[in-house]
Image (tube, rainbow, N blue to C red):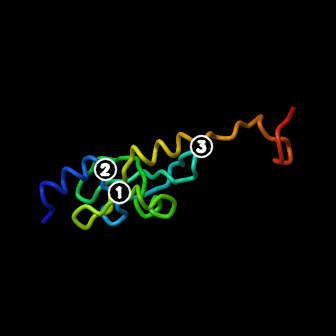
Amino acid sequence: MVSVAAVSALATFGGSDARIKRDVRPVGMLNDGLPLYRFRYAGDPAARVGLMAQDVEQVDPGAVHNVGGIKAVDYDRVTQRAAAIRSPSPRSKSKNGRGRVR
C-alpha cells in the first residue's frame, strides 16, 4: 500500500516508472535527447505523454526519486535542463553538418 505522503510526492514529481505504464510508444524527444512517450498508467484508460524515469536516470540521476517503490521524475528539473539546450537550427550547419553557414 502506498502512503498519503507517497501519493502527494507522486503528484508533485510525476510517477514515471516504466513498470506502471502500459501501451508505451515513443512520440518524440526533448532538446537534450530524452525520449518522450505516449502511454497509459496501468488501470487508467487515459492516454498521456511523458518521460520514463529509467531514461532520465541515465542522464540526471538526481531528477529521479523513489516514492513508495515507484520511480518518479522531477519534471521541473528535467524540463529546465532540456530548455537550456537549444535545438540546432536547420540553417546553423553547413551541408556536411560541420559548422555554421556564414
Q: Earlier in the sequence, mark 3 or mark 2?
A: 2
In contact (CB < 8 Å): disc 1 and disc 3: no
Q: Residue beneath label 1, please?
A: 16
Question: Which secondary structure lies at badge 3?
Answer: loop
In contact (CB < 8 Å): disc 1 and disc 2: yes
Kind of residue at badge 3: Ile
**Percent x, y for residue 44?**
24, 53
Q: Quadrant of residue 3?
A: bottom left
Of the two numbered discs 1 and 3 in the rendering, the one whose residue sits closer to the viewer: 3
Q: Earlier in the sequence, mark 1 or mark 3?
A: 1
Q: Is residue 72 left or right of residue 1?
A: right
What residue sits 45% from the left and 62% below the top?
A: 57
Q: Is residue 52 left or right of residue 102?
A: left
What residue sits 21% from the left and 64% below the top?
A: 68
Question: Which secondary structure lies at badge 2?
Answer: helix
Residue ranking furthest to the top: 102
Q: Residue beneath label 2, please?
A: 13
**Percent x, y for residue 70?**
28, 64
Spatial CA span between label 1 and label 2: 8 Å
Q: Which mark is residue 85?
A: 3
**Percent x, y for residue 23?**
38, 59
Eyeballing the image, is 69 above or below 86?
A: below
Question: Which secondary structure lies at badge 1?
Answer: loop
